[in-house]
Image: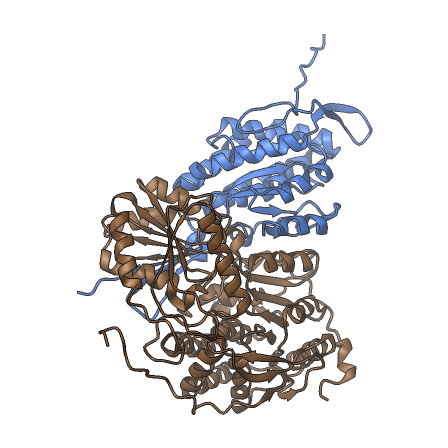
């Protein structure tokens, strides 16, 4: 006798909660052969704005945590992902219609990428910052600080690895993130949100939207409370218009990337979402 | 004669040997521009100084073509050691001609000679000296081995620190191996043109630096030119925004140093004498024509009255007048347009209910002047607390707790600079951590150094100038295989490094080159 499976309802992840889209909209996620897999939430403008509000509220706590602490929290994500490895492999096999080996490789690399970025949390500032020998009685130092709220259009051709490769570096410095998942492969993004929700990542630090990037991205690009936008997965969109929209509030913009090396692990992905702060401290006369 | 009245002590203008008219400096020579020439005047007297060429579209194309040729044939092939030597030469020539440059700057810009002589010009020399040493050490700039220059840099600079902004732009660009087309501000072209003569004395290869004069449309044409690889702009946020839009989707990298509305936070335990001097320096230095000026004074409520009273006393001793007089503290407003903007915003301040107080000083008959002014009873929502006035106008607000000070300081779309005055070191560190600004001065203000990165958060722009980070803005990492996309964003120094798998533009023969660059 076969057991009747209990399918999961895939919703959004905003401010640590899993709401449906306020619009009530969903769209069908299907396998390569057209088989129905799930109804994913189709996020609206309002959902995007709610996510930005949640992300903004989370910036102070996350960026205020010690770098050591952030590193441990990011490492903890890798631990939990490892524990749910089989679930992700199965999900990716179905959604992307790939072999178990291919799906496994993607999950393994995703886990390792969290570990790699976790280790940077308390180190990148030593590489990107420095003391400045100014000509005067001052202690002068430049340090990188998080830019704030980062909106991300995740790579569209990958369920998990592209997503992780885009959000992990933004989190390292203490930014909070609103990410639009792959439109075709959104399910792992929501499953990852379940991992985040049950790890030690504070609510609002990562917010995941599923739906149409073409529809949501313009709202993110033009929103005044977004400090930076990573268009890594926006290659198929009218990304130049998004860049023009982003210029209205002088957002920091990362351009689309494509191919297997999109969002490859790099220190530059961490520092791209930082601001250099230089502080002049007077020295007294003795 | 009171103790405040000094006999005039004007710096002699005899040191200047100005031409009656200046051409554009393209490909190592002065050539006439094809636009309608304009006059540059002294804002202190409105007298004409010289006639300045106006670069039209064809002139811009010539300048970019000259820069491209110089890049392809000379500068990108020269050793870092030799590039550095040219920069050292320039630094020394600036030092040798320092007084002349200072007098010209004060004449053309209206800033007091004591500032141009003791701040602007010495920093210009320091900037070239600092970056000269980087030219043969680029492997250590934080972008990995063999970083590459970008190509032709289009640089558009403002009128508030004409020669200093030129140095901020040109020195790192050349050290990194780029060539330059620079456009000084319409109202302050003079020192840039004298600087062109210095480049001739330094025998810098032709075309490595091209200086074209003109108004905003010349700058826009330059930034838009397809032969440009890098845009560096200092000026208003409005123009910066327009540039960011204009270059969206192109391969041009950008550094934007834009506006600010800096909070200068004074706690009740601050060393008050120094704080008063710091507040005055923060907003009245260079007539307040400073993007990082401490234009919002946040003073702890219990010392508000004392601070305001002492400020008024101090401002009453400032001497406003002839920029070339060695005793002058406050010079002329740079232009009639700027004066009108300052007046307009000040009137808005009054209309919105703030109390205006201006230092009692005699305003000269000719020229553009604005007495140092303080607004008290300013609401955080008032336009004089939110918009950049870019003049000698200070808005005073109060706070009770550090948290309130931080919240008010950060309540602005800008994020260029901030000041903290307190005797408590641990408070400085804690508050500095919370301020969303690129440069923070603790118990000092308006300090600049070529080794120290400068630049803003949020709508104050992106990229850094100065220091290792400023060098990174003119470099990209060594090519690594094929690559698809490239983030245009600069994060300076160690930053963008391994990220940028740059696609290299195919070497192009500048279209305009065929037209010839000299006439």
Residue B506 visible in the snapshot: yes
Image quarter of residue B73: bottom right
**Residue B86: % across, % down:** 51, 84
The colouring scheme, among rainbow, by chain, secondary structure or one colour, is by chain
Screen quadrant of the N terminus of chain B: bottom left
Which colour is chain B painted? brown
The chain that appears blue in the image is A
Q: Residue at x 75, y 81 (%)?
A: B513
Q: Judge by depth and name the residue closer to the eye, B484 or A141.
A: A141
- Between B449 and A271, the residue placed more toward the observer is B449
Give the mark count: 0
The image position of residue B202, as x and y in percent, is 52, 89
B113 up-or-down from B139: above or below: below
Most extreme residue toward the top is A1
Residue B221 vertical placement versus B195 (above, below): above
**Name of the residue lying farthest toward the left:** A286
Q: Position of residue A150 (x, y in %)?
A: 56, 43
- Residue A86 lies, with reference to residue B386, above or below; the image says above
Q: Look at 59% across and 59% down and name the residue there.
A: B240
Given the current orientation, which residue lies at the most extreme right position?
A33
Q: What percent of the width, then of the height, locates residue A188?
A: 64, 31
Most foreground residue, A67 or B5: B5
Does residue B2 appear to the left or right of B463 in the view shown? left
Residue at 47% x, 86% y is: B89
- Any part of residue B448 in sight: no
């Amino acid at each position: 006798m076969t057991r009747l499976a209990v399918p999961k309802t895939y919703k959004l992840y905003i401010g640590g909660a899993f709401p449906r889209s306020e619009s009530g909209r969903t769209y069908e996620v299907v396998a390569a052969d057209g088989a129905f897999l799930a109804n994913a939430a189709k996020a609206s403008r309002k959902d995007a704005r709610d996510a930005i509000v949640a992300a903004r509220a989370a910036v102070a706590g996350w960026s205020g945590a010690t770098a050591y602490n952030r590193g441990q929290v990011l490492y903890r994500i890798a631990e939990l992902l490892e524990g749910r490895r089989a679930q992700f492999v199965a999900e990716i096999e179905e959604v992307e219609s790939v072999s178990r080996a291919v799906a496994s490789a993607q999950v393994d690399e995703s886990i390792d990428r969290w570990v790699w970025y976790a280790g940077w949390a308390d180190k990148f500032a030593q590489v990107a910052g420095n003391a400045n020998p100014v000509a005067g009685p001052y202690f002068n130092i430049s340090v990188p600080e998080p830019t704030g709220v980062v909106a991300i259009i995740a790579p569209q051709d990958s369920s998990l690895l592209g997503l992780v490769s885009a959000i992990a570096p933004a989190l390292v410095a203490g930014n909070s993130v609103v990410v639009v998942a792959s439109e075709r492969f959104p399910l792992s993004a929501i499953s990852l949100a379940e991992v985040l929700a049950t790890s030690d990542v504070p609510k609002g630090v990562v917010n995941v939207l599923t739906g149409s990037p073409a529809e949501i991205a313009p709202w993110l690009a033009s929103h005044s409370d977004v400090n930076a936008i990573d268009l890594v997965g926006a290659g198929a969109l009218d990304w130049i218009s998004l860049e023009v929209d982003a210029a209205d509030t002088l957002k920091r913009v990362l351009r689309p990337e494509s191919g297997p090396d999109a969002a490859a692990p790099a220190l530059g992905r961490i520092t791209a979402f930082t601001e250099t702060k230089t502080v002049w401290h007077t020295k007294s006369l003795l | 004669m009171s103790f405040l009245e000094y006999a005039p002590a004007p710096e002699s203008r005899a040191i200047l040997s100005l031409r009656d008219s200046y051409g554009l400096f393209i490909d190592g020579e002065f050539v006439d521009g094809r636009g309608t020439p304009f006059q540059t005047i002294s804002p202190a007297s409105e007298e004409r100084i010289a006639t300045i060429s106006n670069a039209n579209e064809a002139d811009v194309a010539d300048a970019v073509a000259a820069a491209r040729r110089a890049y392809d044939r000379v500068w990108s092939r020269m050793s870092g050691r030799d590039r550095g030597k040219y920069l050292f030469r320039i630094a020394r020539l600036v030092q040798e001609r320092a007084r002349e440059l200072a007098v010209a700057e004060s004449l053309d810009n209206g800033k007091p000679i004591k500032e141009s002589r003791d701040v602007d010009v010495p920093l210009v020399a320091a900037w070239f000296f600092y970056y000269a040493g980087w030219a043969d050490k680029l492997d250590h700039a934080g972008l990995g081995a063999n970083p590459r220059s970008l190509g032709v840099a289009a640089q558009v600079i403002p009128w508030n620190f004409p020669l200093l902004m030129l140095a901020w732009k040109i020195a790192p660009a050349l050290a990194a191996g780029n060539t330059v087309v620079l456009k000084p501000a319409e109202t302050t072209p003079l020192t840039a043109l004298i600087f062109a003569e210095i480049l001739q004395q330094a025998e810098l290869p032709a075309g490595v630096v091209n200086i074209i004069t003109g108004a905003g449309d010349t700058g826009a044409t330059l930034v838009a030119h397809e032969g440009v690889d890098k845009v560096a702009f200092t000026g208003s946020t409005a123009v910066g925004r327009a540039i960011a839009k204009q270059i969206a989707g192109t391969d041009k990298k950008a550094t934007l140093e834009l506006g600010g509305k800096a909070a200068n936070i004074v706690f009740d335990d601050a060393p008050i004498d120094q704080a008063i001097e710091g507040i005055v320096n923060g907003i009245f230095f260079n007539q307040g024509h400073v993007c990082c000026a401490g234009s919002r004074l946040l003073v702890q409520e219990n010392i508000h009255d004392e601070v305001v009273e002492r400020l008024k006393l101090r401002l009453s001793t400032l001497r406003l007048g002839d920029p070339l007089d060695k005793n002058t503290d406050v010079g002329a407003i740079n232009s009639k347009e700027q004066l009108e903007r300052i007046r307009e915003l000040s009137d808005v301040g009054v209309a919105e209910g703030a109390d205006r107080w201006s230092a009692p000083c005699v305003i000269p008959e000719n020229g553009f002047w604005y007495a140092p002014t303080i607004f008290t009873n300013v609401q955080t929502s008032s336009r004089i607390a939110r918009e950049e006035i870019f003049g000698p106008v200070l808005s005073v607000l109060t706070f009770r707790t550090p948290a309130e000070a931080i919240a008010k300081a950060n309540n602005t779309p800008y994020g260029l600079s901030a000041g903290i005055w307190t005797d408590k070191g641990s408070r400085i560190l804690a508050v500095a951590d919370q301020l969303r600004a690129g440069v923070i001065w603790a118990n000092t203000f308006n300090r600049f150094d070529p080794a120290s990165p400068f630049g803003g958060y949020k709508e104050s722009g992106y990229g850094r100038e100065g220091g290792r980070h400023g060098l990174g803005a003119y470099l990209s990492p060594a090519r690594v295989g094929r690559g698809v996309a490239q983030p245009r964003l600069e994060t300076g120094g160690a930053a963008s490094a391994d990220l940028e798998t740059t696609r290299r533009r195919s070497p192009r023969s500048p279209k305009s080159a065929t037209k010839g660059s000299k006439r």
